[in-house]
Image (cartoon, rainbow, N blue to C red):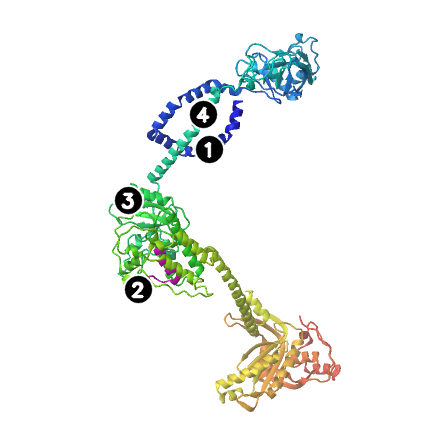
């Protein structure tokens, strides 16, 4: 009951304590030893006071541990559970496993009953299969014949028990005892539970008549009469072998009216009534020591936890102050050579008094700028703990790590903001005293703004202004005044986020003996110095940072140095002119010039109290910024625009490339046959190819030597160009391939490289007639009255064709057929076409052409040959289509077949005659 009361009234304390204890345990596990030492060293008096004040709690705790703790094994029975004990000497502490024997109420006792009222209860007893195995293993049955589970089952389910329950025992009956006990709880002499043993007062108040039986008798019924008023525990009790089982239920017994029994609730606390049984008459019972302990202990622990938490927080504060994990050994910083090779390492570092987060050492420390120059050395970077860091050297001969410096370092280490350069650590050993901070590879804002090669639209500029305002606002929220704010101390990381550096650690840098300032550096210092600081050595103020921010806004707007090189009036150097901002749609113009200029005017007001705070500046810049996206998003947008533009350019270039490729293909196909050119383009090896039958055409200009001697070279070139252009237009109408032109010679072939049966002879013949015909009407440009005369020759026969050379490759024909065709041309006459007998027979076979026999002709290298003149085409001709693969061609001419055979016999003995075997293609 006490536990229930505590849970009802103080459940929220338990929840809070559980959460709080979990948090404290985690924290204490981290610094358990350190906290104990601090407690013993600093707060031993608190522990003594606690021990003196709460000694009685400690005593009670010891008593509980010794006496009350064993009660933890008590098992309070309820309506649905049952418990088992050994048969010999049962008590609260020696309960055993039931092994599969189960009990349950079938008809429960009524919750309320009157004294003397008779009621019936029914309970069930069942045994599972596992119970018999368990009972045999644990020797529950005393019968000597039970050696296994099956024998135990037979004994319990089939063995008859004695008629009188008093004669029943473990040797002759399975359930040899079953009855109902009643224990009025108000009569217990001490707090305990009522079990199957004799109550602690030595008396059993009531019990029913005992019975015995088999395990198959599942339900057991008994009649019960209760006579003692108050809460009564009813226990259904059975004995099986060497074990006993009890099932409990509770009933409240009310006295019957008119029987002279004490009645609770009548307002009179009688002798038989107790505060625990009748609080309505006797009042509430006084709080027991256990209750006092249960209430006082949590409250005491709560107070102790608050004290320990305060001690722990103070310890953590002191621990962070005296923690030296931030101290870095300068020898562990490796020189970063790669950083100096990139543009990101060109972060401006003035040589002035601690005006930057880095300064150059190592290989670049030998740099010395000329007085008055604006150039500054590279920042010094190094590799520490696997990452690149920026190193700021402090030029001092002595350095003492005082408590003030520790407090400054602690303050800076606690800062964490995306627009602040993270403090990593410091070196404290002379002469290598230095400050190590986060490294930003894009350089300072001043470097980026003065670099005209970097395009910056106003989206990026507003982003820089917003980042600086956020960073300084965070510093001001933590009561830190920058005091050295300038564009040189604003750096950009690899994501183009502007971060502020060189903040805090004023005492750390106090002894920094820098070189004398140059004229430019002195001017720059005066430009950023607020007007109220010119005539006094005031400490940095929040309003002074606002004034410096206005100069940075000027630099962002103009992308120029705030101190021009030709500036001569140092008195007005602190107030450079406002920029002329013109609004337009271009990216390089300010979208809100009036608001931007107004912000600059407010920030550099002469009266510090009229300057806005950085919280106000941050909101104002956010309001006037039309592009409220991060630099990364802007870069992605620019890249997307560039990608789209690039796609258009690529499409245009691809189209131009296709046109150029087509022109190249046309040029290539004009130099080489298409099939040969395609093979060359694909890298296939080209080998000479032989052709069984082809027709070659040769022509040259009669009297070309005399014509050339009487003409200028330009006239000759112009004349030949017009002539052969005309020829080229004509040969496009035929299945022929122009091999080459050499001077006035013109060479054409048909049947090579594409074979066309015997039609090559007709293609060349028709083409030759057209070329000779056009020459009759062609006029020489510089001699229009002169008749152009060409002579031509054709010959048919086998040839070999192939590409010769890799530079200016040429498709050439080889074989005796080429020489013979050339001889046909050289022995021909002006405006005449001479053909060999082989070409003659092919044309005769094809039909449709008029040929005249020239007769026997002496041909150099060939001897005597019969040649023919190709006069023209026949007008009355009805011919059928000739297939390129056909071996013969049918034709109708005015000459008879007999005359053709006679003519062939006439010339069969002549040199150059082609028999019928030559006409059959292989």
Q: Estimate the x, y position of residue 559 in percent, counting from the top left.
A: 38, 62
Label 3: how many Cα within 10 Å (few below 14, some 14–19, many 20+): some
Where does label 4 land, which residue?
A: 297
Element marked by disc 1: helix
Q: Is residue 741 above or below residue 595?
A: below
Where does label 1 land, which residue?
A: 22
Q: Tell me the distance, in whole angstroms, between the alpha carbons under discs 4 and 1.
A: 18 Å
- First along the sequence among labels 1 and 3: 1
Element marked by disc 3: loop
Between tags 4 and 3, which lies in front? Answer: 4
Residue 865 in view here: no
The quarter of the picture where the N terminus appears is top right
Q: Tell me the distance, in whole angstroms, between the alpha carbons under discs 1 and 3.
A: 43 Å
- First along the sequence among labels 2 and 3: 3
Q: Nearer the viewer, residue 113 or 78?
A: 113
Say whether marks 4 and 2 touch (CB < 8 Å). no
From the viewer's perspective, is 14 left or right of 53? right
| Label disc, if present, on residue 285 of the rendered structure | none
| Label disc, if present, on residue 565 of the rendered structure | 2
Q: Estimate the x, y position of residue 735 in percent, counting from the top left.
A: 63, 76
Q: Tell me the distance, in whole angstroms, between the alpha carbons under discs 4 and 2.
A: 79 Å
- First along the sequence among labels 4 and 1: 1
Picture quadrant where residue 862 is located: bottom right
Between tags 2 and 3, which lies in front? Answer: 2
Q: Is residue 350 above or below residue 778?
A: above
Where does label 3 land, which residue?
A: 429
Q: Nearer the viewer, residue 410 or 368?
A: 410
Q: Tell me the distance, in whole angstroms, between the alpha carbons under discs 2 and 3.
A: 40 Å
Q: Which residues are magenta?
A: 546-566
């Amino acid at each position: 009951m006490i536990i229930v009361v505590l849970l009802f009234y103080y459940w929220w304390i338990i929840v809070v304590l559980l959460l709080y204890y979990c948090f404290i345990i985690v924290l204490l596990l981290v610094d358990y030893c350190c906290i104990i030492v601090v407690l013993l060293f600093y707060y031993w008096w608190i522990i003594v006071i606690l021990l003196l004040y709460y000694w009685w709690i400690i005593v009670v705790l010891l008593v509980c541990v010794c006496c009350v703790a064993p009660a933890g094994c008590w098992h309070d029975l309820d309506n649905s559970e049952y418990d088992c004990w050994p048969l010999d000497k049962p008590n609260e502490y020696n309960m055993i496993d039931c092994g599969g024997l189960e009990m349950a109420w079938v008809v429960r006792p009524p919750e309320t009953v009157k004294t003397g009222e008779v009621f019936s209860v029914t309970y069930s007893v069942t045994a599972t299969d596992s119970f018999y195995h368990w009972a045999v293993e644990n020797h529950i049955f005393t019968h000597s014949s039970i050696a296994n589970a099956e024998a135990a089952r037979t004994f319990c389910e089939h063995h008859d028990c004695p008629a009188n329950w008093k004669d029943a025992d473990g040797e002759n009956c399975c359930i040899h005892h079953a009855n109902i006990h009643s224990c009025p709880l108000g009569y217990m002499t001490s707090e305990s539970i009522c079990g199957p043993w004799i109550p602690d007062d030595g008396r059993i108040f009531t019990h029913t008549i005992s019975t015995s039986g088999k395990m198959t008798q599942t339900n057991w019924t008994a009649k019960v009469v209760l006579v003692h008023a108050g809460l009564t525990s009813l226990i259904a009790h059975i004995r099986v072998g060497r074990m006993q089982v009890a099932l409990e239920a509770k009933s409240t017994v009310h006295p019957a009216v008119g029987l002279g029994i004490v009645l609770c609730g009548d307002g009179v606390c009688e002798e038989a009534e107790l505060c625990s049984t009748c609080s309505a008459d006797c009042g509430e019972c006084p709080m027991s020591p256990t209750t006092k302990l249960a209430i006082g202990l949590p409250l005491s622990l709560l107070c102790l936890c608050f004290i320990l938490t305060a001690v722990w927080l103070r310890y953590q504060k002191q621990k962070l102050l005296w923690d030296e994990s931030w101290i870095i050994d300068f020898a562990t910083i490796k020189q970063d050579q790669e950083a100096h090779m990139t543009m990101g390492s060109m972060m401006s570092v003035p040589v002035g008094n601690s005006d930057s987060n880095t300064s150059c050492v190592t290989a670049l420390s030998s740099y010395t700028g000329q007085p008055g120059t604006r150039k500054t050395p590279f920042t010094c970077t190094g590799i520490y703990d696997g990452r690149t860091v920026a190193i700021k050297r402090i030029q001092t001969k002595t350095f003492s790590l005082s408590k003030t410096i520790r407090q400054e370092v602690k303050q800076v280490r606690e800062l964490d903001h995306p627009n602040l350069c993270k403090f990593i650590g410091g070196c404290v050993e002379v002469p290598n005293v230095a400050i190590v901070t986060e490294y930003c590879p894009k350089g300072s804002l001043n470097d980026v703004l003065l670099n005209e090669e970097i395009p910056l639209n106003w989206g990026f500029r507003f982003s820089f202004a917003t980042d600086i305002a956020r960073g300084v606002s965070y510093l001001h929220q933590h009561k830190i005044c920058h005091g050295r704010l300038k564009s040189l101390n604003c750096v950009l990381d690899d994501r183009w986020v502007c971060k502020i550096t060189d903040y805090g650690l004023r005492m750390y840098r106090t002894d920094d003996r820098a070189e004398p300032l140059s004229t430019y550096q002195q001017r720059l210092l005066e430009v950023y110095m607020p007007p109220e600081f010119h005539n006094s050595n005031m400490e940095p103020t929040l309003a002074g940072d606002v004034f410096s921010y206005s100069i940075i806004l000027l630099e962002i707007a103009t992308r120029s140095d705030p101190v021009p090189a030709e500036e001569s009036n140092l008195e007005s150097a602190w107030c450079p002119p406002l920029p002329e901002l013109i609004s337009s749609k271009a990216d390089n113009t300010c979208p809100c010039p009036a608001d931007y200029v107004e912000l600059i005017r407010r920030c550099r007001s002469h009266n510090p109290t009229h300057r806005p705070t950085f919280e106000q500046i941050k909101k104002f810049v956010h309001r006037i910024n039309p592009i409220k996206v991060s630099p990364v998003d802007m870069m992605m947008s620019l890249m997307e625009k560039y990608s789209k533009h690039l796609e258009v350019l690529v499409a245009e270039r691809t189209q131009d490339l296709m046109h150029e490729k087509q022109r190249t293909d046309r040029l290539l196909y004009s130099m080489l046959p298409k099939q040969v050119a395609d093979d060359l383009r694909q890298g296939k090896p080209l080998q000479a190819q032989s052709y069984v039958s082809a027709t070659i055409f040769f022509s040259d200009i009669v009297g070309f030597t005399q014509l050339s001697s009487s003409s200028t070279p330009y006239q000759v070139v112009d004349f030949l160009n017009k002539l052969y252009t005309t020829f080229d237009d004509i040969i496009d109408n035929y299945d022929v391939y122009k091999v080459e032109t050499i001077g006035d010679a013109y060479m054409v072939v048909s049947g090579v490289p594409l074979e066309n049966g015997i039609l090559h002879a007709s293609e060349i013949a028709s083409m030759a007639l057209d070329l000779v015909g056009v020459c009759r009407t062609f006029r020489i440009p510089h001699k229009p009255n002169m008749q152009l005369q060409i002579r031509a020759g054709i010959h048919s026969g086998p040839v070999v064709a192939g590409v010769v050379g890799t530079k200016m490759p040429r498709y050439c024909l080889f074989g005796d057929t080429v020489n013979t065709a050339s001889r046909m041309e050289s022995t021909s006459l002006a405006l005449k076409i001479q053909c060999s007998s082989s070409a003659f027979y092919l044309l005769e076979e094809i039909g449709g052409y008029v040929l005249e026999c020239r007769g026997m002709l002496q041909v150099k290298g060939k001897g005597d040959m019969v040649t023919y003149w190709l006069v023209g085409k026949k007008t009355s001709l009805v011919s059928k289509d000739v297939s390129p693969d056909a071996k013969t061609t049918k034709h109708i001419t005015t000459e008879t077949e007999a005359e053709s055979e006679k003519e062939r016999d006439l010339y069969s003995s002549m040199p150059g005659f082609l028999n019928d075997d030559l006409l059959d293609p292989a």
